[in-house]
Image (cartoon, rainbow, N blue to C red):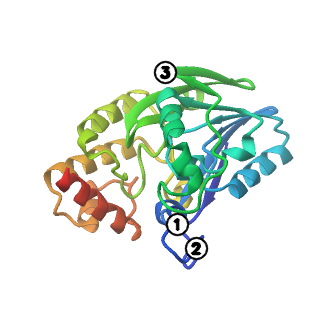
């Protein structure tokens, strides 16, 4: 199991101007993951640039990997930017992710969707699935599950033998990033489905690097995310500090850059 982490470094930015790499990813910290068995690897998201993805590939190849299967957690740019580095591999996504990326491809490749940097060429998924797909990686059996939390195309990876859940952006530490406010109650309900899997460890793409390096979060992160959704819907006046105190969860750690995320969430929920 590998985590490829970048960000949460004071004074370290991709660019001085506002951009999606810094504001949506590096400022919060972001990881891509790889599960390796023998000479095969599942790569879960391709990070914020082709350079990051090439580094992932190089490390894995140096450790004997020759066959790659890429799984995209959802369509957001900080998760799909490096896919070109795996252009000779199977790129798996749910049907909804493929549909969105196909529709947005001209804007993503021109850098006009969320501003620069552009992702050009954008490598589209080569294989899609609905709801659930079993995947063999070497001697391992994994499950890909399509759900709707954070975005309507979320795909998580469930490793039953290890009770390990790669959860993408369905959960974050400090708090989830709201992208679809009208669907928050649906997201809360779908988080319960993830709890029912019985994960002993959860690895989010955005989280505390020390917790990730230590093996991940407990299933308490699921309950804390559900509680946060409840607070957004019912007590949106709370500050992030007050939210963290209210959650009282060992799986949630206050991190100042999430103040901006929390303000965004509150404004989005209040305006609908």
Relative to 258, residue 143 above or below: above
Relative to 135, residue 116 above or below: below
SS at mark 1 in the image: helix
Relative to 112, residue 101 above or below: above
Front-most of 210 and 72? 72
* Residue depicted at x 18% and y 49%: 233
Relative to 112, residue 189 above or below: above
Residue 223 seen anywhere in this rendered image of the structure: yes
Q: Which mark is residue 130?
A: 3
SS at mark 2 in the image: loop
Give the image location of residue 30, x and y in percent. Answer: 55, 56
Front-most of 103 and 65? 103
Circle 1 residue:
22
Front-most of 254 and 100? 100
Q: Which mark is residue 15?
A: 2
* Residue depicted at x 21% and y 47%: 230
Give the image location of residue 137, x and y in percent. Answer: 71, 27
Which class describes the residues within 10 Å of circle 2: few (<14), some (14-19), or many (20+)? few
Which class describes the residues within 10 Å of circle 3: few (<14), some (14-19), or many (20+)? few
């Amino acid at each position: 199991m590998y985590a490829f982490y970048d960000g949460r470094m004071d004074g370290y930015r991709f660019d001085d101007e506002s951009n999606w790499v810094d504001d949506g990813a590096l400022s919060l910290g972001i990881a891509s993951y790889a599960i390796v068995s023998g000479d095969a690897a599942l790569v879960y998201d391709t990070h914020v640039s082709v350079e990051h993805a090439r580094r992932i590939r190089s490390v894995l190849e140096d450790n004997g990997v020759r066959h790659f299967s890429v799984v995209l957690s959802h369509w957001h740019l900080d998760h799909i930017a490096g896919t070109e580095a795996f252009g000779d591999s199977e790129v798996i996504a749910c049907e909804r992710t493929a549909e969105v990326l196909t529709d947005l491809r001209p804007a993503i490749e021109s850098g006009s969707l969320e501003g620069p940097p552009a992702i050009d060429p954008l490598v589209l998924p080569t294989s899609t699935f609905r709801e659930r797909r079993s995947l063999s990686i070497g001697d391992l059996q994994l499950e890909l599950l399509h759900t709707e939390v954070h975005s309507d195309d979320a795909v998580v990876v469930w490793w039953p033998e290890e009770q390990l859940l790669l959860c993408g952006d369905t959960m974050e530490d400090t708090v989830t990033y709201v992208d679809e406010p009208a669907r928050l109650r649906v997201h809360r309900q779908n988080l319960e489905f993830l709890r029912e899997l019985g994960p002993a460890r959860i690895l989010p793409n955005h989280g505390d690097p020390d917790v990730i390096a230590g093996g991940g979060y407990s299933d308490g992160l699921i309950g804390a995310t559900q509680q946060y959704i409840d607070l957004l819907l019912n007590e949106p006046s709370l500050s992030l500090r007050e939210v963290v105190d209210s959650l009282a969860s060992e799986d949630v750690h206050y991190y100042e850059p999430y103040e901006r995320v929390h303000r965004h969430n509150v404004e989005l929920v209040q305006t609908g």
